[in-house]
Amino acid sequence: MTRSAATWSVINGPALRVLRSRFEGPLLQPGDDGYDDARTIWNGSANRHPALIARCAGVEDVVHAVNFGREHDLLVAVRGGGHSIPGHSVCEGGLMIDLSLMKGIRVQAGSRTVRARPGVKWGEFDTETGAKDLATPGGYVSTTGIAGLTLGGGIGWLSRKYGLTCDNLMAAEVVTAQGERVRASEDADRELLWGLRGGGGNFGVVTSFEYRLHPVSSVLGGGLVYRAERAAEALAQAVTFALIAPDELTILALMITAPARAPYPDDMQDTSVLFVGVCFAGDIAEGRGVLQEFRRMAPPDMDLVREMRYPRLQRLLDDGRWGQPWYEKASYAEEITDAALRTFGECWDRRVSARSQMYMQQMGGMISRVPRDATPFDNRQTQFVYMVMSGWEPGEDPEPHVG
């Protein structure tokens, strides 16, 4: 197995047998049934082969796996939902601590709180909280795991109204690198809780998350679609409108190749389009008026905005292509200038795959009102996050797409 210092170590049979005798969940090695499924994460370009996958059935399994990794000085990766774009969920030759079997959600409607285990994905989470007309800010798709998104910050449809995902983290149960079980909250281990609120996944293995919930039932959501020849003008209007929009409205602009299926008409399928995704999380009548103002500024070629339940909005951008290869770069923008918009369009014209996408996510609102030192998450005063995602088919040469 690979050690933490990138050297090799041989784990003898007795040591592995001791771990197996203590471990409740499956322990998978190359060649075992289920090994390839367990090592495959959302981003197929992270095609790595752990020497051992510890599929934890509960907290004690996590403790045993962490202790085994520390005692043998192993390279360790921790998988929650498995949606890590840079592939942190899986390692080559080391120990993969897989939390995806650890499901469980408990909603306390009276106190507007929820506890969830680290294998839960946002689609599962939103279904349970949505049944009580409650929600915590998640991301933009339902297939992302709650664990990685929370520990990284968490920007999504509800963040301008209710803050980042990490801003709504109230407490967490953690297995430390020493194999100790601790609870981080405002009353105990406050510094650890501070680190978990957007500081990344290196403070321990979180085995339970406790979030604050907010009243959310129906939203105005969907997308306004523009043909390629109108994309530059519409994107400029979207950027302008985003800066004056109320906190209840979040805009997500995407340059994509329209899929060859409904609801896109035949002459729009397999062509470039600008999809301006919207979520208005407030009074529906007020939201209709706000969005009508944007429609006057940039009349869409196709209007897919509807009143819908929030969990349905979370599923609209799911692509279902688990295990496909991707390469992404992202950064923050204090402002989006005319020159930046031109560059955005020029970069889109140079794409080499129909799977490529370009995003512009709106920030501001409640995100910017949280004090800078309240969490490790920085860049709260920026207005936008922009991303370039290049995708290709398995087996293709990645270099043209990465370049």
Image (spheres, rainbow, N blue to C red):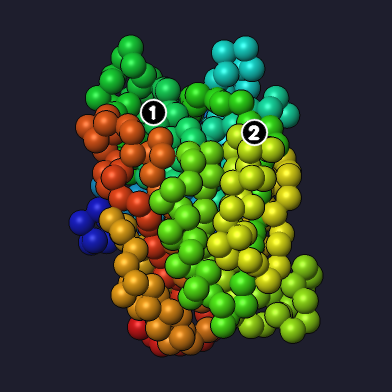
Q: Taking 212 as reference, is 285 left or right?
A: right
Quarter of the image where the C terminus is located? bottom left
> How many marks are shown on the rendered structure?
2
Q: Of the residues tagged 1 and 2, which is closer to the observer?
A: 2
Q: Which numbered circle lies on residue 21?
A: none
Instruction: Kindly identify which residue carries mark 2.
Output: 283
What residue is at 43 percent from the left and 59 percent from the top? 240
Of the pair 284 and 174, the residue shown nearer to us: 284
Instruction: Kindly identify which residue carries mark 1.
Output: 174
Q: Quadrant of residue 110?
A: top right
Q: Taking 108 as reference, is 56 left or right?
A: left
Image coordinates of residue 388 in percent, x first then y, are: 42, 70
Q: Taking 233 as reference, is 279 left or right?
A: right
What residue is at 44 percent from the left and 60 percent from the top? 239
Of the pair 382 and 127, the residue shown nearer to us: 382
Cα separation, mark 1 vs mark 2, equals: 38 Å
Q: Earlier in the sequence, mark 1 or mark 2?
A: 1
What crowding class fits label 1: few (fewer than 14 Cα within 10 Å), some (14-19), or many (20 or more)? many
Give the SS element for disc 1: strand
Q: Quadrant of residue 323?
A: bottom right
Quarter of the image where the N terminus is located? bottom left
Q: Is residue 76 above or below residue 285?
A: below
Regarding residue 192, the answer to whether it shows in the image is: yes
Q: Amino acid at mark 1?
A: Val
What residue is at 65 percent from the left and 75 percent from the top? 258
Image coordinates of residue 26 in percent, x first then y, are: 57, 44
Image coordinates of residue 68 in percent, x first then y, are: 36, 40
Q: Amino acid at mark 2?
A: Asp
Of the pair 216 and 51, the residue shown nearer to us: 216
Q: Is residue 306 above or below residue 283?
A: below
What crowding class fits label 2: few (fewer than 14 Cα within 10 Å), some (14-19), or many (20 or more)? few
Q: Is residue 44 above or below residue 257?
A: above
